[in-house]
Amino acid sequence: MPDMAGPILVLNGPNLNMLGTRQPQVYGTATLDDVVELCRRTAARFGRDVTAFQSNSEGALIDRIQAARGAESAIVINPGGLTHTSVALRDALVIPEVPIVEVHISNVHAREDFRRHSYISPVADAVIAGMGIHGYAAAVEYLASRD
């Protein structure tokens, strides 16, 4: 059983390292560093810590998820495009046995049809989409305030 006061892992998938410059009309002007700082500030209000990881590689994300078992108490994940394609990422997310919140900066349901299906949602405790980077703060707050 994970330590519920342990750090919250904030994972970001492919292309999220380009936040702030990639399609700002869709994703806004905040950078990934801004997202991580927002998560850390939010977690600190609850006396919690955040660890952050981003990769453009599916395998690296899976390795990091596996390493979370016993080390982190919860996961916030924005899988990027892997949301719609990766059964392997979905399968990895059940390994740590911790609460998970799936986050998307844009409202994926108002975009292309292929973005409306998520392999991640069925294993997530909650899904947040369309709140911009504030969705990350909502996810961290939700996870940090759980009993």
Image (tube, rainbow, N blue to C red):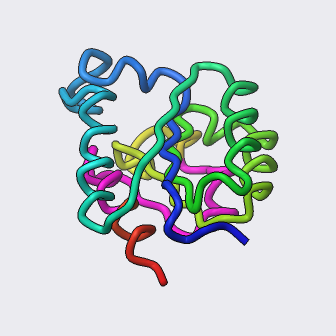
Q: Residue 42: x and y, percent?
A: 26, 57
User: Can the viewer see residue 93 in this picture?
Assistant: yes
Instruction: Give coordinates of residue 124: x percent, y percent.
Output: 61, 63
Q: Is residue 122 visible?
A: no
* x and y percentages locating residue 60 in the rendered image: 70, 25
Check the image and report above or below for 119 versus 6: above
Q: Who's the residue at 73% across and 38% down the image?
A: 86
Residue at 29% from the left image edge and 28% from the top image edge: 33
Q: Position of residue 129 (x, y in %)?
A: 39, 54
Q: Name the residue furthest bottom.
A: 147
Residue 123 shown in magenta: yes
Please state if 42 lies on the left or on the right of 77 as rendered: left
Foreground pick, 48 / 107: 48
Quarter of the image for the N terminus: give it. Answer: bottom right
Query: Which residue is pictured at 43% across the width and 26% down the height?
Result: 16
Q: Would you say 111 lies left or right of 134 here? A: right
> Front-most of 80 and 34?
34
Residue stretch rendered in magenta on the structure:
116-138
Image quarter of residue 61 = top right
135 lies above or below 15? below
Q: Residue at x 41, y 59 (%)?
A: 128
Whether residue 8 appears in magenta in the rendering, the answer is no
- In the image shown, does 81 or 117 lie closer to the viewer? 81
Tag count in the figure? 0
